Structure formats: structure tokens, C-alpha cells
Image (tube, grey):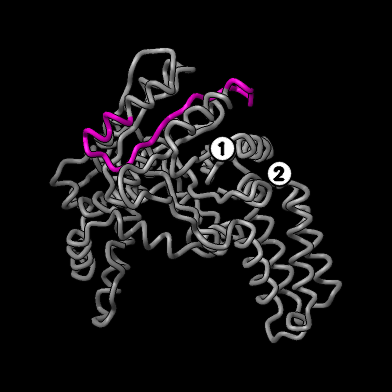
Amino acid sequence: MFEQLQDRFSGIFKTIRGHGKISESNIRDAIRDIRRSLLEADVNFKVARDFVNRVSEKAKGGKVLTSVTPGQQFIKILQDEMADFLGKTAEELQFSNSGITVIVLAGLQGSGKTTTCAKLAHFLKTKRRKNPWLIAADLQRPAAIKQLKILGDQISVPVYTESGLDPVSIVKSGLASAKASKADTVIIDTAGRLHVDQELMTQLQNIVSVTSPHEVLYVADGMTGQDAVNSSKAFSKAIEVSGIVLTKMDGDSRGGAALSVRHITGKPIKFIGTGEKIDDLEVLHPDRLAQRILGLGDIVSLVEKAQETVDLKEAEKLQKRLIENSFTLEDFQVQLKQLKKMGSVSQLLSMIPGAGKLKMDVSDQQLKWVEAIINSMTPEERRNPGILNGSRRKRVARGSGRSTFEVNQLLKQFVQMKKMMKSMGRLKKMKLPLGL
């Protein structure tokens, strides 16, 4: 996510830090590079212009030019302005004080709207302790109803469906059923189109009229860049959009939509979709996202992910094993499962300051291969890798579909890690991070 912008900003920061003193000429060169980077990332040209003008105005102040660490001060100005463009602070969903909260999701076909409905329901159920219901009102795409039912079953959230030609009637019946079942939150999946048209807007306006929703979220495909910004603007003119969800931000999105949509539409980005898994939906924190875009990491979000997914009892047991040098491949297998729950490797690395510069050759696919190799071992081999002789290693390689070289490489790396942990275990006062 935002790899292109991160690479460009890393180069700009390296240059600006290299100057012992920052002059107006240095700032002018940096501003020019920033403008070019933003435009290449498909940021709206008006947004790019406004952004660099604001950064330039603050950077040319005497405070920066005479600062003891002018390079750091310039980066701080850039970070603050980017967070400001993204919305300053996170904007949570608005819930009803009494009765059912109604959330309508709108968007063009192919934006990931139906999947986002299920992701949002899962988020509300697991992280906000709500009792959500889903209403399938997308009659434009026949597969949408089936898709929503499948996703609803996966997260154990009821999905109201009904055959008919009038989505407004279906929504009314769905709301009545949700109230009777004591649901406190209803999420409505509406129809999409390949483009903005009057029929689509009229249908949305009718649904909004009969439901009086607390939130109308526009779902935009983050990979479409300027198209996402333009369609968001069109929808917000036709209906009262309260917020935006940017999807597919884990793909080859250049980041232009995220930086542009808030400034152009005036509507907050409330969530971003960061993957295909049902829990790959994040509340947008402008300050944290600004840090990630600039390649400065996001330790707070990383810690939050760890707290949500790591089993503390299991982590304490693993910590004890590491200190006692009794860590086995079975323990390593548990660690891999914990890591997979936290998200993709690329996402996690993007949250660690400076990790992008390391160009680590680690991918989710490689972790799957490692897991396959360990799974192909017997319980005894996992507990005591020393018994893995040549014939056993060939059998593990065949069972996992990997090469013997890869099996040998994994075992060699495991031995090296054990040696490192043994030396660390001698440091009696050392406190290891839980589960890591």
C-alpha cells in the first residue's frame, strides 16, 4: 500500500536530511519533487497544488530555516499537512441512541460494496459489540444476493433476502424483520452500476428516504484513482453521503484517491479495505495513514493488531520457551499462525518505521511454503529437528511440494535462530516482547 509514494518520499527525505542547513532553494527543490510525486501517484492536480502551497508556506517560515534540525522540522510539517488533508482525526460511525442504527452502502458495480457490507458487519460485531443485520437490496446483480448470504454465514450474521423487483419494499420488510429480531444495526447493500446514471440515483434516493439512515457510506475502488474521486463527488451531490470507504488499498493503488477524495468531496474517509479477508477493514486514522504514506511506519496500529490477535497465554509460554532455549518447530508453527491472523507481511512491514528501506525478501507465499514444510514433518520431527537426516528431508520435501534445498535452508535458519535465542537467554534481565 502506497509503495510508490513511500519510495519517492524516502528519496526526498534523504536529500533534505543531507543538508546541514535548509535554504529557500533547498525547500523549493523539495517542493518541486513532492508535487511531481503526488501527480505521479494520481493525486488530483488541484489537491497537489493546494498541498504543496501549504507546505511551502509553512516551510519557508523562519522557524524551519533556523531550526537546529531543519530536515526533521520540514518532515514534521509535511506529515502534519498530509494528516490534515486526510481529515485530521478519525471519524467514527454515528449510532442511534435509541432504536436501530441504519447504514446504507452505495457505490458503483465492482467497487467491492457487497464484500464491504460483510466486512463492516464483522467489524461492528467483533469490535463494537453490535448485533448487526444485513439486507440484500442489490437486485441489479443476481450474484450479489448469493454472495452476501455466503459472507453472512461465514460471520454468523443474518442476511435478509426476498425475491421481487422493488428494492424499496425489500428494505422496508428487512427493517421490520431486523426490529423483530432485536438487531441494533442494519447494513443495506444497494445496487450498483458500471457508471453513474439517474436510475441508480433515484433508487438510492428512495431507499434513503424510507430508511432515514444514520450513515450513508460511499464505497469507492481505491485502485481507480481519479475515477474514485469523481464518482464520490457525483454520489455526494445526489444523496447526503456521510462518509467514504476506500477498498482494494492492498493492490497496486498509487494512493491518489486516498489523498484526493477527502479534500475534493469534503466527506471523511471512515474506513479503508486492506485485503480480501473478512477482517481486512481498518478505521482510517489520518495521522497514522500519513505516517505510512511517508514511510515513517505506524507502530500504534501494529500494536493494536497484535493485541487483537495474539493469544497472551500462548505468547507467555512461547516467551518462556525462548528464554529456556526449548523453542521447537511446533512453537514456530504457532507463531506463523499468529502472524497470519495479523494480516499480510507487506501490511505489517509498512507499519514498521524504516522497514521499506530493507527490501526484505519475505512474502505471504513464502510463509505458506514454510508452513507446508513444517506440516509435512511428523510431530517428533517438529519437536526434535535434529533427527531429520537426508532421507527424512527428502520425504518432507516431497510431501510439501518444495525442494530439498528449501527444507535444508529452513532448518539451517532455525538452528541459527536457536543459537541467537540461547545467547539472549543468558541476559537474565532481558524482557522479550510477548509472542515475538
Q: Nearer the viewer, mark 1 or mark 2?
A: 1
Q: Residue at x 61, y 35 (%)?
A: 235
In the figure, 67 relative to 129: above or below? below
Q: Nearer the viewer, residue 232 or 39?
A: 232
Report the Cα–Cα distance between label 1 and label 2.
Answer: 15 Å
First in sequence: mark 1 vs mark 2: 2
Q: Residue 312, image x and y in percent?
A: 21, 61
Furthest-left residue in this view? 380
**The residue stretch that appears in magenta:** 175-199
Residue 193 included in the magenta stretch of the image: yes
Tell whether 293 sits left or right of 369.
right
Q: Residues within 10 Å of mark 2 (few under 14, many from 20)?
A: many
Mark 1 lies on a secondary structure that is strand
Q: Quadrant of residue 304?
A: bottom left
Name the residue carrying label 1: 220
- Would residue 389 appear left or right of 44 to someone viewing this image? left
